[in-house]
């Protein structure tokens, strides 16, 4: 039974499974049995605490495999977990910080009581960072979060909802301030991130235009600075890396005629077969960027005029000398074609 097994502190280095993932694990074990044995040393679970709990819930007899007392427990647990779970650098940094702060007889942040007689491996910060493939700077951020952050803040990093560097900045604030900053749940942040992605995708924009949509969402939702960081982090975690410009061109070449592929430089790339068509599209993107910016200025011309600093007056004169005739002619052409 559960109380007959102890939980070794190295088994709690990695974050708890979210409830939905644990439920899925229970359902899988109930249907297919335990696929991977639980690693134990004596009566202490080294790796597999979630599988053990899931077996009890599903009514399936757990299967155990004994670990040698001479085994490198750190390497074993980290290897097994990194193979099964895809963790960000921030999540791995939290694991590394825990690994570097294990003390004999207990483990900071671990909900399970362990025997003082269990062998507990310890590592220096540098070695722990190397083992988890993170920078020592990220590890220091994680230690700050664990030492000074409220539990909700540490949990947000462990669940991949916020970067460890942003969380470390919040952890240095007074606890009441931290409580106010992390007032939104991870699900709320992910919902805002999905809405933001949809609005940017439907607008078909990148760069400054996408940033303006982000600013409007942040204002509508009354997002704090750290919440804005969390939204950006959630979008990045849910978005595959964009191809390089050369990769984008190769994708465009292999696709349907006229295919445009967004690349990591923030520009759309097309097959090089029609230079004039490519140039026409580039001109449109530049024009759209400028018109959209002018068309959505949130203040009247008088306030715009009053905001111009003295040292920029010459630049403004040059810009207006080019922009006003251009806009007048463009407006005339547009009116004629849409009369």
Image: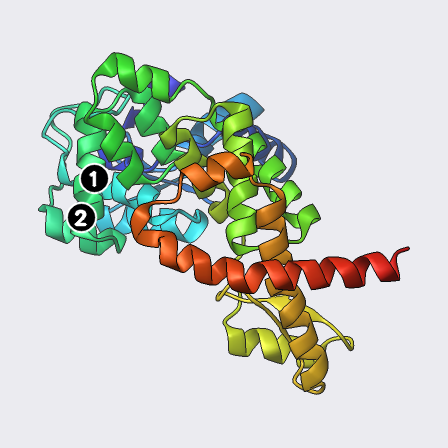
Residue at image location 20% in from the left, 39% down from the top: 141
Residue 238 appears in the figure: no
Q: In which quarter of the image is residue 116?
A: top left
Disc 1 vs disc 2: Cβ atoms closer than 8 Å?
yes
Say which residue label 2 marks. Answer: 137
Quarter that holds the C terminus: bottom right
Q: Residue at x 52, y 74 (%)?
A: 245
**What residue is at 70 percent from the left and 87 percent from the top?**
273
Crowd around label 1: few <14 · some 14–19 · many ≥20 (10 Å): many
Residue 201 is situated, as x and y percent measured from the top left of the image, at: 66, 49
Q: Report the front residue among 197 and 167.
A: 197
**Lateral position of residue 94 relative to residue 284, left or right:** left
- Element under label 1? helix
Dividing the picture into quadrants, the one containing residue 327 is bottom right
Q: Name the residue tied to disc 1.
A: 141
Residue at 56% x, 32% y is 192
Q: Can residue 326 be seen in this view?
A: yes
Judged from this view, the residue extending furthest toward the right is 339
Task: Judge from the rendering whether residue 279 lies leftward or rightward of residue 231; answer left or right.
Answer: right
What whole-number distance in Å separates the C-alpha atoms at marks 1 and 2? 6 Å
The percent coordinates of residue 280 (x first, y second) are 69, 75
């Amino acid at each position: 039974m559960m109380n007959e097994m102890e939980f070794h502190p190295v088994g709690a280095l990695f974050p708890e499974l979210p409830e939905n993932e644990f439920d899925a694990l229970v359902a899988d074990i109930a249907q297919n049995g335990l696929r991977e044995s639980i690693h134990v040393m004596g009566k202490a679970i080294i790796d597999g605490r979630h599988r053990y709990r899931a077996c009890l819930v599903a009514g399936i007899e757990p299967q155990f495999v004994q670990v040698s007392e001479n085994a490198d427990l750190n390497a074993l647990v980290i290897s097994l977990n990194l193979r099964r779970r895809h963790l960000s650098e921030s999540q791995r940094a939290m694991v590394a910080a825990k690994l570097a702060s294990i003390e004999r007889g207990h483990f900071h942040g671990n909900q399970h009581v362990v025997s003082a007689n269990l062998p507990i491996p310890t590592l220096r910060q540098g070695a722990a960072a190397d083992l988890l493939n993170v920078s020592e700077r990220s590890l220091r951020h994680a230690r700050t979060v664990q030492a000074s952050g409220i539990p909700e803040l540490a949990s947000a990093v462990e669940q991949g909802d916020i970067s460890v560097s942003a969380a470390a900045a919040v952890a240095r604030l007074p606890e009441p301030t931290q409580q106010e900053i992390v007032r939104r749940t991870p699900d709320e942040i992910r919902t805002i991130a999905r809405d933001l992605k949809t609005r940017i995708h439907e607008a078909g924009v990148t760069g400054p235009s996408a940033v303006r949509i982000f600013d409007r969402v942040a204002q509508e939702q009354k997002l704090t600075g750290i919440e804005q960081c969390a939204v950006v982090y959630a979008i990045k975690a849910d978005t595959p890396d964009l191809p390089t410009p050369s990769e984008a061109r190769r994708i465009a070449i292999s696709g349907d005629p006229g295919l445009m592929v967004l690349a990591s430089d923030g520009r759309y790339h097309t097959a090089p077969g029609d230079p004039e068509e490519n140039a026409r599209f580039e001109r449109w993107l530049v024009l759209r960027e400028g018109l959209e910016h002018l068309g959505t200025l949130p203040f009247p011309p008088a306030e715009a005029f009053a905001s111009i600093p003295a040292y920029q007056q010459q630049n403004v004169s040059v810009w207006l000398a080019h922009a006003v005739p251009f806009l007048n002619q463009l407006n005339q052409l547009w009116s004629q074609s849409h009369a």
